[in-house]
């Protein structure tokens, strides 16, 4: 019970943004007028955070943009002081971050709240910024496009595995955790698909995916039928990202209504504001207040064009997972930000594909400390994931409750 209370508190720190670290700015990359020069992975900054007993390495690495073109992306490697050049890490953890909007909320720009909680576990944490943040913050983020974000994540993992030995670190290569909640959960399952399809030499020990929009067409259909959403900024960001990166070419005026239409660049795309601030400026969670009637009509040509694009990134169809995957799915039954139909459909798909170890933790968990269902689900997710990690590593929770009181 003491450990459970601690992890509920730890998850609150994640949601409340208790600690933000800063790091050095990235160096400018040389540009060739004919073709972009994509450098090898390299560390661009190193900081030791004394109060969190961890070292933060900011790094850049070769990857691709959402169109598949070569690009340089950024991320972080965080290592607790218990891991040294003489004491190998217990394994690696690929952490896929949840929804962020403000430029300084990505890992390489210093937002390392989750990573600071993992420090002390004996795991090395690798955290991609995704395309649209860090070194590519001048680009529009590929929001909830799992194929693009998963590629950024897997490439970050491969680059970190290349860099760590040069920094003097070693680890148990039999342990690789893959985790994320909300957009991070969506990305985590995208990572599973990508590795299963293209990286036969990589094997994930355990995947923890919470409240992700795995079946994104069903997600949007649910929003239209329900008429509301817990986070309007996320609906807007999905529509913007798929229009941009699937080259739909739909004028914004056909998608959005005023006053949002005239303020999208400032409110949503400027990277000046946090998600909560954007939702406050939007001022409503009723879909019809900011989306056009054509987008609300499931039979309209415009809506059908969007659904064709959304289906291309549907994680609940069209791929063959390895049967020996180990996956934990967590979802609050009352979530109106990411509807539970996503976890239901993903579980059904995975079991139909023969994946034996798929654990689902779902239900009406109530509302912890007045947090909405989506945020309360994050508390349950953190608690369950840490419990399973401790079980696999055969260790106790690495913090005492008194350390954070």
Image: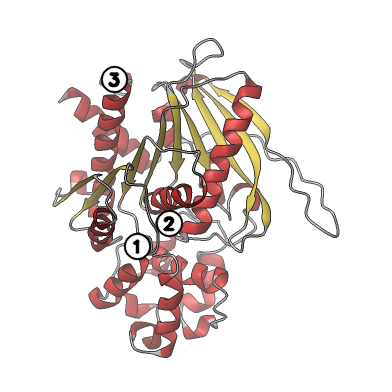
Q: Are marks 2 and 3 in contact (CB under 8 Å)?
A: no
For the residues labelled 3 and 1, the Cα–Cα distance comes to 38 Å
Residue identifier under label 3: 394
Q: Mark 3 or mark 1: which is in front? A: 3
Residue shown at 55% from the left, 66% from the top: 266
Disc 1 crowd, CA 10 A, few/some/many (<14, 14-19, 20+): many
| Number of other residues with Cα within 10 Å of mark 3, as a class: few under 14, some 14 to 19, many 20 or more | few
> Which image quarter is the N terminus in?
top left
**Where in the figure is residue 161, as x and y percent of width and height?**
57, 31
Q: Residue at x 44, y 40 (%)?
A: 95
Marks 1 and 2, how far apart in space?
8 Å
The residue at which mark 1 appears reads as 231
N-terminal of the pair, mark 3 or mark 1, is 1
Vertical order, 142 against 310 (above or below): above
Identify the element where label 2 is drawn.
helix
Q: Position of residue 356 (x, y in %)?
A: 24, 45
The residue nearer to you, when weighing 57 against 352, is 352
Residue 118, relative to residue 103: is it above or below?
above
Q: Residue 275 carries which label?
A: 2
Mark 2 or mark 3: which comes first in sequence?
2
* Mark 1 element type: loop
């Amino acid at each position: 019970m003491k450990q459970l209370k601690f992890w509920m508190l730890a998850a609150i720190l994640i949601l409340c943004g208790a600690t933000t670290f800063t790091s050095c700015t990235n160096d400018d990359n040389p540009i060739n007028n004919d073709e972009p020069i994509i450098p090898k992975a390299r560390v661009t900054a190193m900081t030791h955070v004394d109060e969190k007993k961890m070292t933060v390495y900011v790094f850049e690495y070769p990857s691709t943009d959402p169109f598949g073109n070569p690009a340089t992306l950024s991320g972080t490697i965080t290592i607790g002081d218990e891991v040294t050049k003489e004491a190998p890490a217990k394994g690696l953890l690929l952490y896929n971050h949840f929804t962020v909007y403000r430029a300084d909320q990505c890992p390489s720009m210093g937002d390392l709240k989750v990573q600071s909680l993992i420090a002390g576990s004996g795991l090395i944490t690798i955290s991609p910024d995704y395309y649209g943040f860090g070194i590519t913050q001048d680009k529009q983020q590929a929001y909830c496009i799992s194929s693009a974000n998963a590629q950024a994540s897997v490439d970050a993992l491969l680059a970190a595995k290349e860099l760590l030995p040069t920094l003097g670190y070693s680890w148990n290569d039999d342990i690789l955790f893959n985790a994320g909640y909300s957009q991070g959960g969506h990305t985590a399952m995208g990572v599973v698909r990508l590795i299963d399809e293209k990286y036969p030499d990589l094997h994930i020990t355990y995947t923890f995916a919470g409240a992700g929009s795995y079946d994104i067409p069903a997600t949007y259909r649910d929003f239209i039928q329900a008429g509301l959403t817990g986070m309007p900024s996320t609906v807007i960001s999905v529509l913007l990202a798929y229009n941009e990166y699937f080259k739909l070419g739909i004028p914004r005026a056909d998608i959005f209504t005023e006053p949002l239409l005239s303020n999208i660049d400032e409110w949503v795309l400027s990277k000046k504001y946090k998600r909560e601030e954007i939702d406050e400026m939007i001022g409503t969670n009723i879909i019809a207040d900011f989306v056009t009637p054509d987008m609300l009509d499931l039979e309209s040509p415009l809506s059908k064009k969007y659904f064709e694009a959304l289906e291309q990134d549907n994680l609940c169809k069209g791929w063959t997972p390895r049967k020996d995957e180990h996956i934990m799915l967590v979802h609050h039954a009352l979530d109106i930000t990411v509807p539970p139909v996503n976890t239901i459909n993903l579980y059904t798909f995975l079991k139909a594909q023969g994946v034996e170890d798929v654990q689902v933790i779902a239900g009406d968990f109530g509302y912890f400390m007045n947090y909405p269902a989506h945020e309360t689900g994050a508390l349950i997710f953190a608690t369950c994931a840490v419990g399973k990690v401790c079980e696999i590593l055969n260790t106790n929770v690495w913090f005492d409750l008194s350390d954070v009181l």
